[in-house]
Image: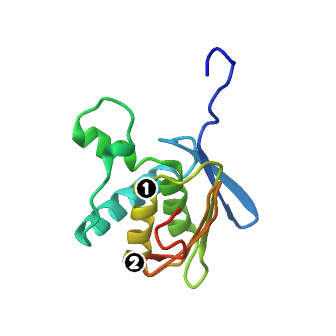
Amino acid sequence: MKERNLIKEAGCSWIEVDNKIHRFHVADTSHPQVQEIYDKLDEMALKIKGLGYVPNTDFVLHELEEEQKEQFVFQHSEKIAVAFGLITTSRPKPIRVFKNLRVCGDCHTAIKYISMATGREIVLRDSNRFHHIKNGTCSCNDYW
């Protein structure tokens, strides 16, 4: 890739709330509500682990300790956007998140569990398809 001057596009996710686009990158701390967002992420991590979710740290490319990998995988942009959606919208309105790249397997699984834990419908549009997630089930039948 370097020889051809190609660079990989950075992953980002965005969500529209009250006619305003909120954009997030991995481990993003730039949002004014960052503390609330990460508190919600921590809360969701505990809830979904209680339901059986096990983080898949194979999606973390860095050489880190397993616990650090777990923390890192929970800072993917789509999870941050979903957490923001949970604190800024209410039922029955679905949470709609858009992502410029393909969603990773861990995020797909985690968001299914978040949907189950919260009773919220989550629509995730990645670079391949729309994922309509409701009660822990995705419209893609886990094929994406």
Of residues 132 and 87, the one nearer the viewer is: 132
Q: Residue furthest bottom?
A: 92
User: Which quadrant of the structure image shows residue 137?
Assistant: bottom left
Of residues 139 and 18, the one nearer the viewer is: 139
> Residue 43, position in %: x, y?
34, 63
Dot 2: within a 10 Å radius of its alpha carbon, few (fewer than 14), some, or many (20 or more) residues?
Answer: some
> Residue 40, position in %: x, y?
41, 61
> Residue 142, position in %: x, y?
46, 68
Q: Which residue in the protein does label 1 denote? A: 105
Say what amino acid the circle numbered 1 marks: Gly
Q: Is residue 1 above or below residue 13?
A: above
> Residue 57, position in %: x, y?
32, 46
Q: Is residue 3 above or below residue 115?
A: above
Q: Is residue 66 above or below residue 126?
A: above
- Mark found first going from the N terminus, 2 or 1: 1
Of residues 117 and 129, the one nearer the viewer is: 129
Q: Which residue in the protein does label 2 denote? A: 116
Report how far apart the C-alphas of labels 2 and 1 lie in the structure: 17 Å
Q: Residue at x 53, y 49 (%)?
A: 77
Secondary element type, mark 2: helix
Of residues 133 and 1, the one nearer the viewer is: 1
Total numbered badges shown on the rendered structure: 2
User: Which quadrant of the structure image shows residue 130?
Assistant: bottom right
Q: Residue at x 27, y 59 (%)?
A: 54
For this view, does 137 lie left or right of residue 56? Answer: right
